Amino acid sequence: MAQKVLANKTKGYRHHPQLDRFKSHADPLRAIGFYLYCIYKEGKRRGYRFDVKKISRNSKNCAPIKVFCGQVDFEAMHLASKLSKRDKEAFRAMKKQKKLKLHPLFKPVKGGREAWEKHG
């Protein structure tokens, strides 16, 4: 769906705030292609099946997107909260990590939450 939004091929989810990350990239379709390709590789490593042909711009590298450390921390806390209720084993494994490993597309920089993030 994100690919279609960035290619202006759908009306739904066009204003989803997290897509702003990709829209800010010099080549949004390449960025989403690289993002999805990395997801595909990780899924394959874990034994999941994902049709790589569905990635419209299957990029194997891409200039990074800067993300605020505060936003990364916020999203990690949100994920931990969900995992604590849904997947205790994954929650324990996450808690053991000293440093969260980000997707290779994202480069952490100093800063708080993103302006589009819901506060509450």
Image: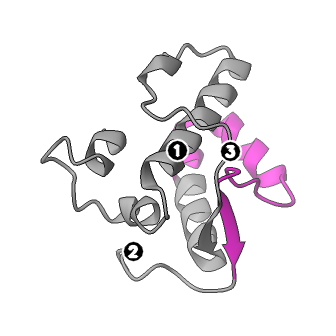
Q: Which one is closest to the eye, mark 2 or mark 3?
A: 3
Dots 3 and 1: beta carbons under 8 Å? no
According to the image, label 2 marks what residue?
A: 117
Q: Which one is closest to the eye, mark 2 or mark 1?
A: 2
Q: Residue at x 55, y 63 (%)?
A: 75
Q: Residue 83: within the magenta?
A: yes
Residue 100 horizontal/vertical position (percent): 76, 57
Q: Quadrant of the N terminus?
A: top left
> Left or right of 97: which side holds 114?
left
Position of 16 relative to 70 (above/below): above
Instruction: Indicate the amino acid at tag 2.
Output: Glu
Lower position in the chain sequence, tag 3 or tag 1: 3
Position of 54 relative to 76 (above/below): above
Q: Residue at x 66, y 76 (%)?
A: 69
Question: Where does the magenta region start and end?
Answer: 82-109
Q: Residue 119: within the magenta?
A: no
Closer-to-camera residue (80/60): 60
CA gap, disc 2 and disc 1: 23 Å
Q: Which mark is residue 85?
A: 1
Q: Residue at x 42, y 31 (%)?
A: 56
Mark 1 neighbour density, 10 Å: few (under 14) some (14–19) many (20 or more): few
Residue 59 horizontal/vertical position (percent): 59, 38
According to the image, label 3 marks what residue?
A: 61
Residue 40 horizontal/vertical position (percent): 59, 27
CA gap, disc 2 and disc 3: 27 Å
Q: Residue at x 63, y 70 (%)?
A: 73
Position of 58 relative to 94 (above/below): above
In terms of secondary structure, where does tag 3 sit? loop
